[in-house]
C-alpha cells in the first residue's frame, strides 16, 4: 500500500511540475508576442554590413524610432512616423495637421549620404544638406536633392531642374537616368566635399556642381533662390527630409562623414 501511494504521489508531482513548466513557457511566449516592433522580424533593412561599418558608414535612422532627429526650428509636428522600418510622412490635409521638415540633430560638413526613397502617385519631397535655421524653411539655406513623381505630378508642368535627382531649380538630372517604376524604391546618394557636390541615383552619377562657383552664381540668379541670400552659403549644417504635404517613405539612411 505504501509503495502504491509513493508511486501515486510521484505521478501527481510530475504532472504538477509539467503544468508549471508549460505555464511558464506560455507566459514567456505571450510576453514575446507583446513586444512592439516597427520593423519586420528578420529584416535586413536599416542595417549596415560589416564592410560598410569598416568604411566608416553610420546609420542615421535605426528603423525603430526618430532618435537622432528633430523638427526644423523645433516646430510642432504630427505628420512624421516610423512604421515597418520606414520613415513615413503621412498624407494629411486636415486643419489639425502640424507639418514640419525632419532634420538631423547633428550638423555635417563633408560627407556621403545614402538613402532609399519612394513616393506615391503625385508625391513630392526632397533631401537638403548644410541647412541652417535662421530662415523660414530649410530650402532657403540648403541645396535640395529633388524627389518627385516625375510623370504623375498634378501641378504645373515640371522643368528639367525640378525632376527627381536634380539639384532643385539649379542643375537638371539627365533624361535617361536609371529611375525605377512609380511606387518602387529608388536608392540615392549625395556626396559633399568642400564646394564639390555629386548626386547619384540607383548607382549612377546624375550630376555634379561646385557651390558658389561662377556657374552656381549664374544659375542662382535665374532661379527661385535669386533673393535667398543664405542659399548654399553655410560650410556645414543639418540634413533635412522635406515634408511637402504628401506621403513619402525613407529607409536605409546612412552617412559617412
Image (spheres, helix red, strand yellow):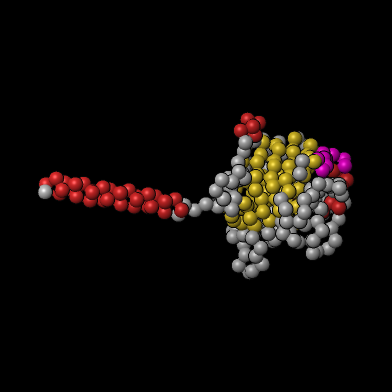
Foreground pick, 90 / 33:
33
Stretch of the chain drawn in magenta: 205-215
Is residue 84 rendered to the left or right of residue 157? left
Q: Give the image quarter of residue 49.
A: top right
- Evaluate whether residue 68 shows in this view: no
User: Could you say which is closer to the camera, residue 75 or residue 184?
Assistant: 184
**233, 142: nearer the viewer:** 142
Q: Residue at x 66, y 63 (%)?
A: 91
Question: Residue 226's spot in the image, x, y percent?
Answer: 83, 51
User: Most extreme residue toward the left, as rendered?
Assistant: 1
x, y percent for residue 107? 64, 41
Say which quadrant the C terminus sits in: top right
| Number of marks drawn | 0
Report the residue at 32% width, 48% height from top: 21
User: Height in image: 156 above or below 70?
Assistant: below
| Residue 36 in the image: above or below residue 212 | below
Magenta stretch contains residue 241: no
- Return the x and y of residue 27 as percentages of the image width and height: 37, 52
For the point 78% across and 37% down, the residue is 195
Question: Can residue 19 be spotted in the picture?
Answer: yes
Give the percent coordinates (x, y) of residue 163.
81, 53
Drawn side of residue 113 relative to residue 150, left or right: left
Is residue 214 found inside the magenta-colored segment of the image? yes
Amino acid at each position: 500500500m505504501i509503495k502504491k501511494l509513493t508511486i501515486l504521489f510521484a505521478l501527481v508531482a510530475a504532472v504538477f511540475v509539467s503544468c508549471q513548466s508549460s505555464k511558464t513557457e506560455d507566459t514567456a511566449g505571450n510576453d514575446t508576442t507583446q513586444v512592439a516592433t516597427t520593423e519586420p522580424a528578420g529584416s535586413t533593412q536599416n542595417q549596415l554590413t560589416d564592410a560598410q561599418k569598416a568604411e566608416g558608414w553610420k546609420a542615421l535612422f535605426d528603423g525603430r524610432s526618430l532618435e537622432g532627429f528633430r523638427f526644423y526650428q523645433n516646430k510642432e509636428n504630427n505628420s512624421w512616423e516610423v512604421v515597418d522600418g520606414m520613415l513615413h510622412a503621412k498624407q494629411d490635409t486636415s486643419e489639425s495637421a502640424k507639418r514640419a521638415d525632419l532634420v538631423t540633430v547633428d550638423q555635417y560638413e563633408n560627407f556621403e549620404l545614402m538613402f532609399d526613397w519612394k513616393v506615391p502617385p503625385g508625391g513630392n519631397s526632397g533631401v537638403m544638406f548644410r541647412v541652417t535655421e535662421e530662415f523660414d524653411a530649410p530650402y532657403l539655406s540648403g541645396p535640395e536633392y529633388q524627389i518627385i513623381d516625375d510623370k504623375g505630378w498634378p501641378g504645373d508642368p515640371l522643368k528639367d531642374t525640378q525632376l527627381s535627382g536634380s539639384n532643385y531649380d539649379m542643375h537638371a538630372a539627365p533624361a535617361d537616368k536609371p529611375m525605377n517604376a512609380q511606387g518602387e524604391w529608388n536608392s540615392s546618394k549625395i556626396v559633399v566635399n568642400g564646394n564639390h557636390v555629386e548626386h547619384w541615383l540607383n548607382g549612377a552619377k546624375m550630376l555634379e556642381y561646385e557651390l558658389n562657383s561662377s556657374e552656381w552664381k549664374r544659375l542662382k540668379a535665374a532661379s527661385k533662390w535669386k533673393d535667398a541670400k543664405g542659399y548654399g552659403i553655410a560650410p556645414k549644417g543639418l540634413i533635412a527630409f522635406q515634408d511637402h504635404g504628401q506621403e513619402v517613405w525613407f529607409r536605409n539612411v546612412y552617412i559617412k562623414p
